[in-house]
Image (cartoon, rainbow, N blue to C red):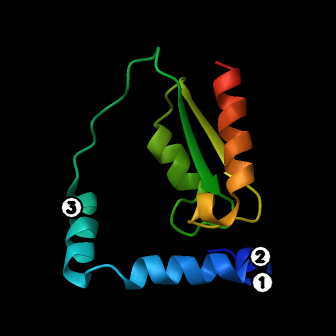
């Protein structure tokens, strides 16, 4: 979560804390382990458009990680939302909606 969200939308920070704290710790850990051990499914067919959306303050989904995830595929668009962190839809839902609508309309 970005500093901007914590400062200007404290209710979002409270929501994220509640979402995380209500998780079963063992189940959450297993999900993280499974994600870390997942195989790369390989590239998607070139005719399928893909958008990777991340907050520019996201310490997990950094610009370098997004480029790595895109793997140089021509059908992948990377967009960053200014001032948002890892909980992008919670932190700036209107920006996410605009980003997705723009992506869809330009396909």
Which residue is denoted by mark 2 in the rendering? 4
3D distance between C-alphas at marks 3 and 2: 31 Å
Measuring 70% from the left and 60% from the top, which residue is drawn there? 92
Q: Earlier in the sequence, mark 3 or mark 2?
A: 2
Secondary element under disc 2, as helix, strand or loop, is helix
Q: In this view, does 102 lie above or below 86?
A: above
The residue lying toward the viewer, choosing from 65 and 104, is: 104
Left or right, 3 with respect to 63, comes to right
Res 105 → quadrant: top right
Which residue is denoted by mark 1 in the rendering? 7
Res 26 → quadrant: bottom left
Left or right, 75 with respect to 91, comes to left
CB of mark 3 within 8 Å of CB of mark 2?
Answer: no
Which residue is denoted by mark 3 in the rendering? 34
Most extreme residue toward the top is 47
3D distance between C-alphas at marks 3 and 1: 33 Å
């Amino acid at each position: 979560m970005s500093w901007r969200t914590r400062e200007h939308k404290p209710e979002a920070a409270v929501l994220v804390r509640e979402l995380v704290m209500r998780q079963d710790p063992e189940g959450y850990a297993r999900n993280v382990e499974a994600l870390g051990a997942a195989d790369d499914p390989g590239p998607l067919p070139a005719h399928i458009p893909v958008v990777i959306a991340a907050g520019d303050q996201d310490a997990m989904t950094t610009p370098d990680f997004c480029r790595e995830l895109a793997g140089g595929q021509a059908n992948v668009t990377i967009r960053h939302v200014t001032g948002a962190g890892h909980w992008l839809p919670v932190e700036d839902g209107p920006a996410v909606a605009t980003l997705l609508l723009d992506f869809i309309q330009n396909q």
